[in-house]
Image (tube, rainbow, N blue to C red):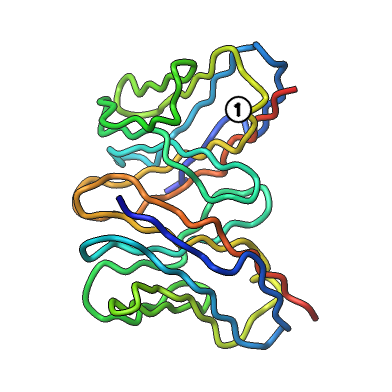
């Protein structure tokens, strides 16, 4: 079965600074990988996804993520953070022969002025 | 495209009562999922429908939980004899037919059992 680890529970970053959120997955084959964002009390919004092909994927809101098979990682990055990026971010993995997503525990991002 | 909708958004109930939640997926999405999210955790899979067929149930889904999708459109999730441990956010997601693996989530139903 697949699993996801997000090593950082909480990250604080200054507005305008760069952001990187770590995600490591465990799965025997090439996974489907996703990043979702959740604002307080809300559902999850899809930021970006990786299925195959180019390992650097672009998403909404200026986010990008890079799939590194050798490191079993799919880290999320943003060059310049805005105050509205304060939220909880979840990495998820899906399997090609399965239906469900497995989520990490999430990373809470706080943006300071 | 109106997105996935869930009703109610919040539910407070007393222990031992039954509750039912509704999910309306994105139209023409034939796949529907229920997840549960507790505080400080990521969503955990509960069950999955393809059209009206319930194809998978997690071991998290005890006998007190039942889900239906009678006509392959909206879905309901019922919890009988609620317990305080059932307090969580219940999320619904839908996915279109074909090889797209993207799941689109609704706003969730926050259940509080007192």
Is residue B114 or residue A112 the one in the foreground? B114
Give the image quarter of residue B51: top left
User: Which residue is drawn at the image coordinates 56% and 49% (left, top)?
Assistant: A43
Is residue A97 or residue B67 the one in the foreground? A97
User: Which residue is drawn at the image coordinates 42% and 68% (left, top)?
Assistant: A24
The x and y percentages for residue B46 are 42, 34
Chain identifier of the residue bearing label 1 in the image: B
Q: Is residue A110 left or right of residue A71?
A: right
Total marks shown come to 1
A78, above or below B70, in the image: below
Label 1, residues with CA under 10 Å away: few <14, some 14-19, many ≥20: some
Which residue position is annotated with label 1? Answer: B86
Point out the residue furthest to the right here. Answer: A113
User: Which residue is drawn at the image coordinates 38% and 33% (left, top)?
Assistant: B58
Is residue B72 or residue B114 the one in the foreground? B114
The x and y percentages for residue A73 are 38, 74
A78, above or below B24, in the image: below
Q: Is residue A50 left or right of residue B105?
A: left
The x and y percentages for residue A74 are 40, 73
User: Which residue is drawn at the image coordinates 65% and 45% (left, top)?
Assistant: B39
Give the image quarter of residue B108: top right
Quadrant showing the C terminus of chain B = top right
Tag 1's secondary structure? Answer: helix
Q: Is residue B31 left or right of residue A37?
A: left
The x and y percentages for residue B111 are 65, 30
Is residue B37 or residue B97 the one in the foreground? B37
């Amino acid at each position: 079965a697949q699993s996801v680890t997000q090593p950082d529970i909480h990250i604080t970053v200054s507005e305008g600074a760069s952001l990187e959120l770590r995600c490591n997955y465990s799965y025997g084959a090439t996974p489907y990988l996703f990043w979702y964002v959740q604002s307080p009390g809300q559902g999850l919004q899809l930021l970006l996804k990786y299925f195959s092909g180019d390992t650097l994927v672009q998403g909404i809101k200026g986010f990008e993520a890079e799939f590194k098979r050798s490191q079993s990682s799919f880290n999320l990055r943003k060059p310049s953070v805005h105050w509205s990026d304060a939220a909880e971010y979840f990495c998820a993995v899906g399997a090609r022969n399965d239906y469900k997503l497995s989520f990490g525990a999430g990373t809470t991002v706080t943006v300071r002025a | 495209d109106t997105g996935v909708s869930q009703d109610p958004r919040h539910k407070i109930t007393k222990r031992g009562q039954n509750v039912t939640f509704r999910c309306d997926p994105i139209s023409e999405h034939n796949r529907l999922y229920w997840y549960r999210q507790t505080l400080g955790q990521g969503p955990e899979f509960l069950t999955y429908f393809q059209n009206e067929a319930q194809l998978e149930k997690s071991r998290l889904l005890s006998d007190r939980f039942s889900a239906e999708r009678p006509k392959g459109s909206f879905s309901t999730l019922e919890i009988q004899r609620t317990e305080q441990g059932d307090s969580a956010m219940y999320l619904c997601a839908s996915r279109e037919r074909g090889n797209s693996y993207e799941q689109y989530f609704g706003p969730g139903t926050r259940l509080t059992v007192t």
